[in-house]
Amino acid sequence: MAKTFNTSGFLAIDIGGTKLAVGVVSTSGVLLSRMQAPTPVTGVWSVLEGLIRLQMQETAVELVACGVGCGGPMTRGGEQVSPLNIPDWRGFQLRSAIEGATELATYIANDAQALVLGEVWCGNAVGVDDVVGMVVSTGVGGGIVLHGKLVTGRLGNAGHIGHVIVEPDGRLCECGAYGCLEAHVSGRSIEAITGRPSNQATEDVKITAGKLVGRALASVGAIMDLKLCVIGGSVALGFGEPFFAAAQNELDRCARLEFIQGIQVMPVGLGDAAPLIGAASLARSSY
């Protein structure tokens, strides 16, 4: 018997190095349901496809399109993705795989690009035309909105703030460079540096991570002429006030040109729902 739907919404997918999440988001930006699983070392697509099919089977919402936030880099539109924190995927044909599984028009972007669009839609950046969004989690990503439009760049990878150099001659990053922000403040990097998971970080570790994020933001703010940064991700949100205060203090110290003074740093307004609502915002703005 065919399902009867009383409302419509978007299938939303968030793909990260630690977890895979699939949810349903209403057309007004409310996360209606979600399910997730740890990201396996191999067989990532098999696990993700299972979540997708289960979510679609159980939802009572008519799904009109699918939005996906995924770690990068990727080719434009997510035709192929090669997330640094998912070694199982190198040149993985993500969009065709998801469209084959869902039969929905699918829109894919970097996870932090999705996040910032969600915050502009219904989070802490509502009414702000120029904003950078960050995800500080297993990895570190970024997305930039200028004049109300997402900056995508030549291949769709614009905003990768995790690969701004913050420590000359610093740690080796997964990308092959030394001293990247991601190599010092991501969850995996913090565990490698301290010998324990990021959720057991000391106050000093939280403050140091915030300081390095603020340093990177001073450079991005100067280049892009921004006034607001919203940050999500399990590491940033888990570190809380010490992290955000340190980021703001370092940004204020480094951002000395008049036009970038006063850039504000704050947590995402959508909390841990930000990745999925952000993914839905991709579908909302495109379908």
Image (tube, helix red, strand yellow):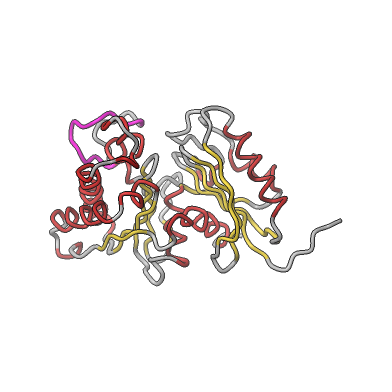
Rendered residue at 21%/41% (across/down): 166
Q: Main secondary structure of the magenta part?
A: loop
Rendered residue at 38%/66% (across/down): 125
Image x and y of residue 13, in percent: 56, 49
| Frontmost residue, 159 versus 196 | 196
Q: Residue furthest right?
A: 1
Span of residues in magenta: 164-174
Image: 19 above or below 61: above
In the picture provided, is 116 more to the left or to the right than 255?
A: right
Which image quarter holds the N terminus? bottom right
Q: Residue 165: within the magenta?
A: yes
| Frontmost residue, 229 versus 107 | 229
Image: 60 above or below 176: below
Quarter of the image holding residue 80? Answer: top right
Rendered residue at 48%/33% (across/down): 86
Image: 124 above or below 42: below
In the picture provided, is 35 more to the left or to the right than 244?
A: right
Image x and y of residue 250, in percent: 17, 53
| Frontmost residue, 143 versus 206 | 206
In the picture provided, is 184 more to the left or to the right than 42?
A: left
Q: Residue 274: within the magenta?
A: no
User: How many circles with numbers are drawn on the protein?
Assistant: 0
Rendered residue at 69%/45% (across/down): 53
Image x and y of residue 192, in percent: 30, 30
| Frontmost residue, 277 versus 68 | 277
Which image quarter holds the C terminus? bottom right
In the picture provided, is 115 more to the left or to the right than 260?
A: right
Image x and y of residue 245, in percent: 22, 57
